[in-house]
Amino acid sequence: MGNNRNYSKELESRIETFKKEGRRPKVLLHACCAPCSSYCLEYLREYFDITVFFYNPNITSESEYRKRVDEEKRLIAEYNRQIDENDFEGMNSDKDAGKIDIIEGDYKPSDFYEAVKGYEECKEGGERCRKCFELRLNETAKVAEKYGFEYFTTTLTISPLKNAAVLNEVGEEAAKEIGGKVSFLPSDFKKKNGYKRSIELSHKFDLYRQDFCGCSFSKAQREREKMGL
Ligand code: SF4
């Protein structure tokens, strides 16, 4: 699926409006892992008051889940330390950066398996992933509404393997589902060298970078690819 919208430019244009209005909207940022969050947080913390929402019941095992959420918390602690110590060496953000909070969602893999039922055999990037995005972004929208956020969005658009048009469409539908009380912030974080920057930051902070997306199906697919199958 594709369309002519440039989600990266749409986000830039919203940011310009907020700057003119002299305000920092509250955004709930759904995060899939620390490497993908690294650039998104560096970029967004200049303009928004951010709370990360770590909600990923798709992750294949409890141990993998813990590794990813612990790295997310370590990254956020490092970004907040930079503010406390006014130490932005090697970062693109500076004194305008705001502190970041985190909310951890439920980790119930059965919710994921229920959501993708019937689509298990789809290839990565297909209908199974759309169902997975719907699960995670619908929950993000609900939590954003519950806690009075103005916006929500997701780090998932930083991945070159994920279709930004589908993610933005799913996000906008999730906002509609809850009656439009919270808006989905358009994004395509891979643009503006965002993906490249996330790799640099992952090295800088020595972040754990998994080599598969998250679910057991993507893990099995990666194993087959590694064996040349
Ligand atoms: S490959 Fe990634 S996005 Fe697709 S269903 Fe699995 S965890 Fe979700």
Image (cartoon, rainbow, N blue to C red):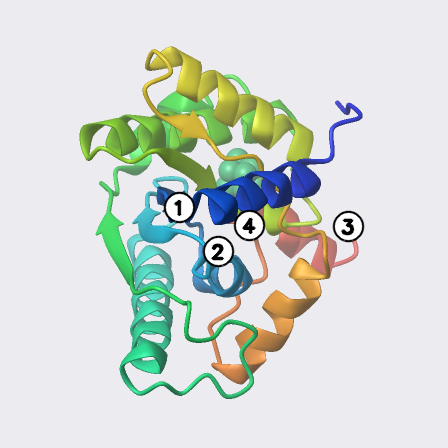
Element assignment for label 1: strand
Mark 2 Cα within 10 Å, few/some/many (few <14, many 20+)? some
Q: Is residue 29 above or below residue 132?
A: below
What amino acid is at disc 3? Leu
In the image, taking residue 205 as reference, residue 158 lies left or right, namely right
Would residue 111 be seen by someone viewing this image from the given angle? yes
Disc 1 and disc 2 in contact, CB within 8 angstroms: yes
Q: Closest to the observer: 127 or 26?
A: 26
Q: Residue at position x 30%, y 65% from top? A: 99
Q: Residue at position x 46%, y 25% from top? A: 134
> Which residue bears the numbered disc 4?
213
Q: Residue at position x 46%, y 61% from top? A: 46
Mark 4 Cα within 10 Å, few/some/many (few <14, many 20+)? some
* Label disc, if present, on residue 44 of the rendered structure: 2
Element assignment for label 4: loop
Measure the alpha-carbon separation of dots 4 and 2: 23 Å
Q: Closest to the observer: 94 or 16?
A: 16
- Judged by depth in the image, the label closer to the viewer, 4 or 1, is 1
Would residue 131 be seen by someone viewing this image from the given angle? no
Name the image quarter holding residue 181: top left
> Which residue bears the numbered disc 1?
29
Q: Closest to the observer: 115 or 194?
A: 194
- Judged by depth in the image, the label closer to the viewer, 1 or 2, is 2
Residue 164 in percent (x, y) is at: 66, 36
How many discs appear? 4
Whether the residue carrying mark 4 lies under 8 Å from ligand 1 is answered with yes
Q: Is residue 87 above or below residue 212?
A: below
Q: Earlier in the sequence, mark 4 or mark 1?
A: 1
What amino acid is at disc 4? Cys
* Label disc, if present, on residue 229 of the rendered structure: 3
What amino acid is at disc 1? Leu
Residue 27 in percent (x, y) is at: 36, 43
